[in-house]
Amino acid sequence: MSYKVVHYINQFFANIGGEEMAHVAPELRDGAVGPGTALNAQWKGEAEIVKTIVCGDSYFAEHEKEAKEQVIAWVKAEKPDFFIAGPAFNAGRYGYACANVAIAVQELGIPVLTGMYVENPGADYKDKVMIVSTRDSAAGMRQAAPTMAKLAMKIMKGEKIGASVEEGYMNMGVRVNMFEEERGAKRAVDMLINKLNDKPFVTEYPMPSFDRVAPNKAVKDLSKATIALCTSGGIVPKGNPDHIESSSASHYGEYSIAGVQALDEAGWETAHGGYDPIYANANPNRVLPVDVLRDMEKEGLIGKLHDKFYTTVGNGTAVASAKKFAAEYAQKLVADGVDAVIMTST
């Protein structure tokens, strides 16, 4: 028996286009499209993608209710054995769509699976839907497709699913008792000996590593201080003239707000792909509060608002890149006599 699968992908993987085509409404196609062909190849006839649902990332973000209703209607009509979405890698809006569509289909009683990078905003739903952990870009498709296909097949066959570290999905917060052949004391000593002898070992409890930055001294007199705004929320002039990427940014923008009392919808927007852009585009001051700082300037609470701001996208951007951006524009801010910076995020 061949299992029937419905697959959800965005406009990019459907080969429609990139950001410029992210507005396309949902459409239904026969058979496998894009990454679906890789999944079909892994299943070797045991399962087959019979329908592919395509939806633009911006369309889903701006018409979520309508998009989900259409997807559900198509899935109900097809009555598949399984539903798979993505993988989305580190594309924020795509990951959000994959997770939410999968949850909606799951509520129909149909088993589902999606995949994305661990820092994708959609990964926040890992306690509600099974999400395979992928690399941060489509370059990881070669690893993602076999992992997703194998796990999907086990689910379809009703086989026992192993631990997240074994199967490749993100920890869903479920704890299950298991027994190791060797006692913890012996395993710990073995790891210590390997470490002391510069031999490879894998800890059973990896600890997070956090940067620690010592705070500067407080500004003595805000009423005489020049304050600058910077953001990782992606606020840019309308049209994104410097083409700052919606995720994994490779550069930042420097823009003048000299004489600007508040940002407006006509002149500004967000380039960020990791959160719903509707409210930021309707009022960009929500992310970059030029209006509030101008009020503080008029009231004498601050000396002045710096006439330039620096912006990039934090969504999936490498820490090394973020440090490089800041090191560059920090020198510009110092040279311009800025006393303090307010850094906003999303």
Image (cartoon, grey):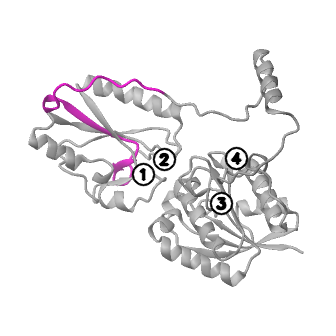
Residue 11, which numbered label?
A: none
Cα distance between the residues tagged 1 and 2: 7 Å
Graded by Cα atoms within 10 Å as few (under 14), some (14 to 19) or many (20 or more), the crowding at tag 1 reads: many
Q: Which of marks 3 and 1 is in front?
A: 3
At mark 4, the secondary structure is: helix
Kindly report the secondary structure that dominates the magenta region of the rendered protein: loop
Segment tinted magenta in the rendering: 212-241
Disc 1 vs disc 2: Cβ atoms closer than 8 Å? yes
Tell me what residue is drawn at x 15 percent, y 46 percent.
295
Asked whether 238 falls inside the magenta stretch, the response is: yes
Cα distance between the residues tagged 3 and 1: 22 Å
Mark 3 lies on residue: 86
Name the residue at the bottom extreme. 77
At mark 2, the secondary structure is: loop
Q: Position of residue 166 (x, y in %)?
A: 79, 47
Question: Is residue 9 left or right of 282 when viewed as pictured?
Answer: right
Mark 1 lies on residue: 271
At mark 1, the secondary structure is: loop
